Image (spheres, rainbow, N blue to C red):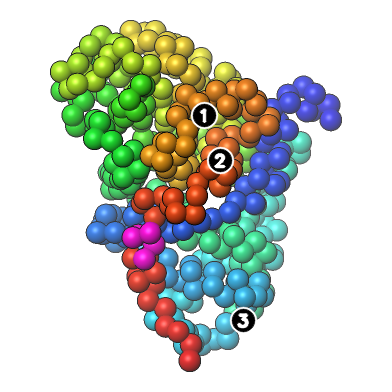
Amino acid sequence: MDLLQKDFSLWFLFMHREQIELQRDFSKSCLARLYRLFLKDNPMPMLNHGFEQMTGLNLRDWIKCSFAVYGCVLKDQQLRFPRPIKLPDVNLDPRKFELFLDRASAMPSQIGAWFLNKRHGTKSKFHTLIRSVFFQYPLIRHDDSNYVAPFPSLVFQYAESSIYETIKELPRFADEFGTSFETYVRGLVEQCAETPLVWTEGALKDAAKDKSCDFIIDQGSYLILVEVKATRFSRDILTPDNISTDNSTKKIAIAALQLLSSLRDLRDGRFRGLGIDANKPAFAVIVTYGEVPFANSEWYFERYLRPPIEERAASAGALDLDSFEATPIVLQANYFEILMGLLRYRFRTLPELIQDRTLQGYGATGDWDTYLIKLWETLAPDTASLPTTNPDVESFHAMLDFQKSE
């Protein structure tokens, strides 16, 4: 309790590690994102090749193995795969399935050693902030045939997170994955915004003084400036020091600076030739690939983002953060998709959403992800589905090519 009294923000970190991140629900849009990012039109050929060299499976087979296991886990969290493995319901090489199981599982002794290693050099008061080992190994392996999945949802999540953690160390990651992610977000903007008034970086860069943001969306009475960063919080231990030095924090600060640069160009009239009204109120959204815990909380923003952003903005001649109508919003891509859906169906405007969250307070609404999910479930009629979801979900299921049992 003394620790929390000295720094109440730690309470949020403890809650996130012990409860929130283990209770994530998933939807069809998660399947659509997985398909678009890693499989559709073979967006990452070199990374796919590198992944296969490291794991023995290409991206398609890895994802098929993940969902074959997830289907079994939904029936029974205790799994039995006698060797040699036979897969009557899955159109997949059993040898590849064995490779997947070996990488996705750990023996109890290995799990204990993993935690001891993470605790080494970490103050005891922060031990509860160590990420669960089951994000890295969603299966406990008792022997070559018997497995247990303590958290079935993590088996689902592993399909995507394990790919990201593997390919991020490969040489073409920034190029191929960054491009694939930006293409994915562009699809969300173009399909969900339901307006022809969307300008991409390609259209903005010739008029911009410095590097522009990725998108400007005209919502009639206001503008949304969007910057995309293929990042997520990557540390296994969620301490304040690790937040400050994590690459995701640096990437968000860089994104904010690019948004401020574009806002300056907007106010200077540099985009007037493109038909963008320089006088409209402007809001900023930073879209990340994965989760950056509490990035929209006041303590995170004031402690980790505002000082370096304002220092660099001043030296670069950019506007200050208060030049936007509201503090820049940081959204993981799947929640940005919900935001675009809300705007598309005109359930709410972005200023209305910001005002509502401000009135309720962060403690009542939670971060933007929780707020948007609840709002979508409340406001969206049964017929209003996210526009990007259904076609790609159908393609995803066709890719799995699972055979039906007789």
Between the C-alphas of marks 2 and 3, the distance is 41 Å
Q: 97 or 111, which is in the foreground?
A: 97
- Mark earlier in primary sequence (2, 1): 1
Q: Amino acid at mark 1?
A: Leu
Contact check, label 2 and label 1, Cβ < 8 Å? yes
Marker disc for residue 375: 2
Q: Amino acid at mark 3?
A: Arg
- Mark earlier in primary sequence (3, 1): 3
Helix, strand or loop under label 2: helix
Return the x and y of residue 307 as percentages of the image width and height.
51, 14
Q: Is residue 272 visible?
A: yes
Q: Which residue is mark 1?
A: 353
Mark 1 surroundings within 10 Å by alpha-carbon count, few (fewer than 14), some (14 through 19), many (20 or more): some
Instruction: Please give the range of residues in magenta.
Output: 390-394
Magenta stretch: dominant secondary structure:
helix
Q: Which residue is mark 3?
A: 80
Tell how many labels.
3
Q: 170 or 121, which is in the foreground?
A: 170
User: Which label sits in the foreground, 2 or 3?
Assistant: 2
